Image (tube, grey):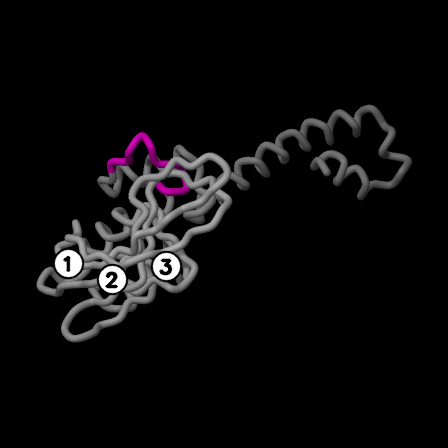
Amino acid sequence: MKAKEYTLKALNSIYRSDPWVQQLYNAAGIYADNISEVLDVVFSNYFFDTADLNTVKRFEREMSIIPLSTQSIEERRKIIESKWKANGKASIALLQSVADAWYKDGIVIDFVDGKLLYEVQSGYIMLNLKYIVELLNEKKPAHLGYFFRNIMSAEGKIRVAGVVSCGNTTNIPADLDISIEIDDSVVSAVGFVRLCNLIEIR
């Protein structure tokens, strides 16, 4: 309901049909509607997940973030949120908040045998894993190593319906300076698949 309609309903029915009152409330209503629209934009930009493109660009400029042309606005929002939450003393809680900005409860961070453990919970596929790792490494103490457990990482888009069967396990070198294992997989699918780097790390 527009502001004019709302305010006119509050008047006595005799005044509602008066042309002068109609014009007065129409002018005031348009002004109030404009204010309401501006407030909606302001409130939406208060939250990371609803910020518009102009606000995202401003945050990126102020935080020295250089986005990739392939990144969606949702991905750019998550990077901003992660860096914002990472401003503080390094701790498990801080690193957990950075991870939660991408996948709430999807990654559990712990300290095991002198290293940080990034454990992905069952059922999660880590899209854009490299951005999460970059942000976590930026905030963790430099002398601490880290390792992953139960990671499935995907880059690109996945549109697929079918069956995945796993075969033998093969050790391969990792890009993250750790040793990992990847399951050889056979994918039987119907549909369109555009996929790069689908790996499972155990």
Name the quadrant containing residue 120: bottom left
Residue 165 shows up from this direction? yes
Name the quadrant containing residue 77: top left
Q: Is residue 106 above or below residue 154?
A: below
State which tag comes first along the sequence, 1 or 2. Answer: 2
Q: Which residue lies at the image location 31% right of the left edge and 30% below the top edge?
A: 69
Contact between marks 1 and 3 (CB within 8 A): the answer is no
State which tag comes first along the sequence, 3 or 2. Answer: 3
Q: Is residue 117 above or below residue 64?
A: below
How far across and how far down the image is residue 197, in percent?
Answer: 29, 44
The N terminus lies in quadrant = top right
How far across and how far down the image is residue 25, in percent?
Answer: 73, 31
Mark pair 1, 3: CA separation = 23 Å
Identity of the amino acid at label 2? Phe
Where are the magenta residues, as a range? 66-76
Report which residue position mark 2 lands on: 148
Mark pair 1, 2: CA separation = 9 Å
Image mark for residue 100:
3
Q: Which residue lies at the image location 63% right of the left edge and 35% below the top edge?
A: 32
* Viewer-nearest residue: 95 or 177: 177
Packing grade of label 3 (10 A; few <14, some 14-19, many >=20) is some
Q: Which residue lies at the image location 20% right of the left edge and 59% below the top edge?
A: 180
Identity of the amino acid at label 3? Asp
Image mark for residue 178:
1
Q: Residue furthest front?
A: 167
Mark pair 3, 2: CA separation = 16 Å
Contact between marks 1 and 2 (CB within 8 A): the answer is yes
Residue 80 shows up from this direction? no
